[in-house]
Image: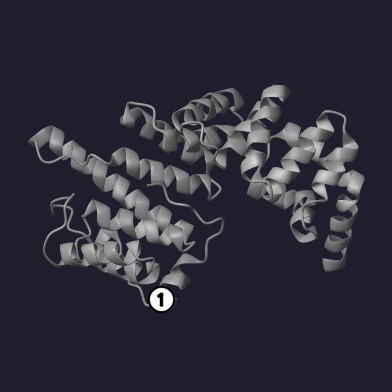
């Protein structure tokens, strides 16, 4: 299953040291050693214990065990990938990228061996790329994310809703709105029309493409499912403004509690966290100005200098 990725990362080496974790490195492995897709011996025991702890929500303990696994069996593909999973869940995104990359590289190398010698394949390369692509999507690397997710889609060889949702977002962040719209539409059709948070992104992309009616119809379904979500309320207010109903737009925006609402006048938040398309940002600015939030944020910023 795809991990829910945190929005910020701690300094990874400091975090690891504070937890008393070893700092494993694939470079320590004997390059002649066999790449493993199934653990054995002590590594297998620790790996299974780590999975049990992770399933129980004890991520710190699971991370310690996975780190030990990578020390004992540094060429075991899934020791690294599971270590990366816990690092993502705990917010250590840069460190997780290293772990995921190690697992991807080992998996690729294993498959080259298979082609030459007929050994057991590493069949989960698409999933490793999906996880790394999703991580990079949330860690300021949309181009790297799109590359991983395109390869994951190719390897999967059939439509996969998780890959499509994430690739749509990556395409969106790379300015490929028409391609993003196609991915979002297929992902929506594959999820039994059960409204999910990513539908909001799909609505924003349709708005960017000038499909105002379809965009608003999609957003109304999202708003029906998640009526109190600040970003949903802000998007609804923005689309009302685009329809010329500024009074209703202001009322909808003011339904958001002050602290959360003021974020929608913060350029850093808009660019780096929610990352709305340009057309939505232009309309949103009209509503935030109408309620005076832009001046409030400017005053707070000036007082902090």
Q: How is the image coloured?
A: one colour
Specify the quadrant that holds the C terminus: bottom right
Height in image: 144 above or below 269? above
Give the left or right position of residue 148, taking residue 301 as reference.
Answer: left
Residue found at the very far front of the displayed protein: 224
- Residue, x 21% and y 55% (percent of image)? 75
Give the left or right position of residue 295, taking residue 269 as reference.
Answer: right
Nearest the eye: 236 or 126: 236
- Residue, x 67% and y 24% (percent of image)? 214
Q: Position of residue 125 (x, y in %)?
A: 29, 40
Nearest the eye: 2 or 132: 2
Q: Is residue 305 visible?
A: no
Q: How many numbered marks are there?
A: 1
Q: Is residue 164 visible?
A: yes
- Residue, x 58% and y 36% (percent of image)? 199
- Residue, x 17% and y 39% (percent of image)? 121
Q: Which residue is mark 1?
A: 19
Q: Quadrant of residue 278?
A: top right
Q: Quadrant of residue 86?
A: bottom left
Q: Position of residue 14 (x, y in %)?
A: 47, 72
Give the left or right position of residue 59, taking residue 278 as reference.
Answer: left
Which SS class for mark 1? Answer: loop
Nearest the eye: 194 or 54: 194
Height in image: 6 above or below 239? below
């Amino acid at each position: 299953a795809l991990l829910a990725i945190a929005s910020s990362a701690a300094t990874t080496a400091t975090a690891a040291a504070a937890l008393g974790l070893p700092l494993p490195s694939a470079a320590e492995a004997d390059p002649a050693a066999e790449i493993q897709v199934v653990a054995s011996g002590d590594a297998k025991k620790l790996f299974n214990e780590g999975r049990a702890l992770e399933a129980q929500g004890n991520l710190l303990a699971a991370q310690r065990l996975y780190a030990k696994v990578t020390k004992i069996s540094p060429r075991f593909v899934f020791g690294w990938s599971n270590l990366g999973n816990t690092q993502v869940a705990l917010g250590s995104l840069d460190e997780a990228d290293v772990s995921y990359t190690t697992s991807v590289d080992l998996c690729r190398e294993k498959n080259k061996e298979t082609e030459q010698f007929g050994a057991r394949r590493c069949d989960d390369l698409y999933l490793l790329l999906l996880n790394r692509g999703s991580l990079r999507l949330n860690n300021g690397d949309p181009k790297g994310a799109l590359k991983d997710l395109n390869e994951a889609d190719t390897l999967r060889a059939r439509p996969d809703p998780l890959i499509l949702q994430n690739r749509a977002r990556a395409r969106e962040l790379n300015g490929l709105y028409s391609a993003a719209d196609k991915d979002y539409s297929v992902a929506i059709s594959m999820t039994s029309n059960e409204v999910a948070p990513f539908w909001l992104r799909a609505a924003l992309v349709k708005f960017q493409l000038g499909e105002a009616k379809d965009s608003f119809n999609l957003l109304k379904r999202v708003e029906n499912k998640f009526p109190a979500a600040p970003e949903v309320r802000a998007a609804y207010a923005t689309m009302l403004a685009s329809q010329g109903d500024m009074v209703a737009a202001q009322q909808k925006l003011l339904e958001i509690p002050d602290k959360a609402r003021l974020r929608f006048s913060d350029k850093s938040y808009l660019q780096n966290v929610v990352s709305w398309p340009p057309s939505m940002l232009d309309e949103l600015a009209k509503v935030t100005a109408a309620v005076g939030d832009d001046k409030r944020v400017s005053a707070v910023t000036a007082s902090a200098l």
